[in-house]
Amino acid sequence: MAASAWWNDFRYANGTMHVKKTGAAVRLEPAIVRDFLSWFVFHGWVQMARPSAPKDGPRIWFTPDTPRPWYFIWPVMALSHARFAASPEDADIIFVFDDATCVSSRALPPGKPVINQYCTDISKTRVAQVFEQVSGRVLLCDPMNPAGRYVEKSELNAAHDGRVLSEPQAPREGYTYQRLINNVDNNGHVLDLRCSIIGGEIVQVYLKRRPVERRFANSNSSVTLAEPAAVFTPAERALISRFSVAMGLDWGGIDVLRDRDTGELWIVDVNKTDMGPTIALSLSGKITAVRRLAAHFDSYLAARLQDKLALAA
């Protein structure tokens, strides 16, 4: 499988783990160590379950990067029928897999279905613009004239550096400004609705809760798994689907907030190379999530190949 020696992606020095490709540095504090151990238990389960998954499905070539085990697509590939292609020529399907927030179009092998080919900009501003197009609701705001509390966020993918502001300020380069959505639940936690998307369809929803003071953190107090129909109305699911299609997102995750005051949904973030399953989810929940995604991924791949045959006929 395409994840041999993944530990070589990291370098340890003076109590800090450095990611060689991105330069990110993570201090090895007790909470981080606990998260790693939780992930490692799940990874071990995937390694044991992988041999039982028949590998008779389409071959996928990932470009420009090959997913490592902490990306959600890796355990999904392990438990699906799909196979990693050894080269683009051997592939049945191409998967554009790039962590960058904005990517340029690249030359791809002709005549083959491509996953996430048109998902080239997942900046927060682009997400808000597409959401406005499909919903008619304005998420962006002018920080010089915000008309209430608002949020400043980096445009970059997975920065987790948002902050709530109330006073006007000049916009900073590389940041976007959005209205503050009141997604606080009855227990005083913010509630994020993380949707797994395949082919424009919501496969499952993570209910992610954490204290308000850690609104933008990447760690959660609790995470539970839910069926889309238990969280969203048919009209809301259709809205999320239209948004996913407009973003060009064939595979990935989107973050949705429900405004406590109005009941309206707001889509605030997109990740086309999402990591997962979420650490705070129970092991049984992780197993359910990855098995469900693997089954949907197999069906999606079969449909894409069938569409290709229909077009060629």
Image: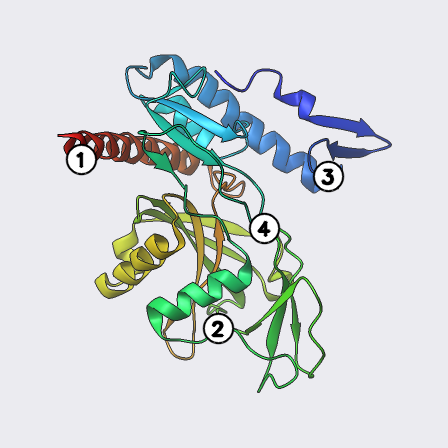
Say what amino acid the circle numbered 3 marks: Pro
Measured in 3D between alpha carbons, the distance from the residue under mark 2 to the one under mark 3, in whole angstroms, is: 37 Å
Check disc 2 and report its element: helix, strand or loop.
Answer: loop
Q: Is residue 245 visible?
A: yes
Check if mark 2's residue and mark 1's residue have beta carbons within 8 Å. no
- Residue drawn at 67 percent across, 61 percent down: 174
Earlier along the polypeptide chain: callout 1 or callout 4?
4
From this view, report whether residue 239 is shown above or below residue 103.
below
Check disc 4 and report its element: helix, strand or loop.
Answer: loop
Discs 3/1, front: 1
What is the x, y in percent for residue 46? 45, 22
Check if mark 1's residue and mark 4's residue have beta carbons within 8 Å. no
Measured in 3D between alpha carbons, the distance from the residue under mark 1 to the one under mark 4, in whole angstroms, is: 35 Å
Measured in 3D between alpha carbons, the distance from the residue under mark 4 to the one under mark 2, in whole angstroms, is: 18 Å
Q: Is residue 10 left or right of residue 217?
A: right
What is the x, y in percent for residue 299? 24, 33
Q: In front here: 248 or 51?
A: 248
Discs 3/4, front: 4
- The residue wearing badge 4 is 157
Earlier along the polypeptide chain: callout 4 or callout 2?
2
Discs 2/1, front: 1
Say what amino acid the circle numbered 1 marks: Leu
Check if mark 2's residue and mark 3's residue have beta carbons within 8 Å. no
- Residue lying furthest top in this view? 51
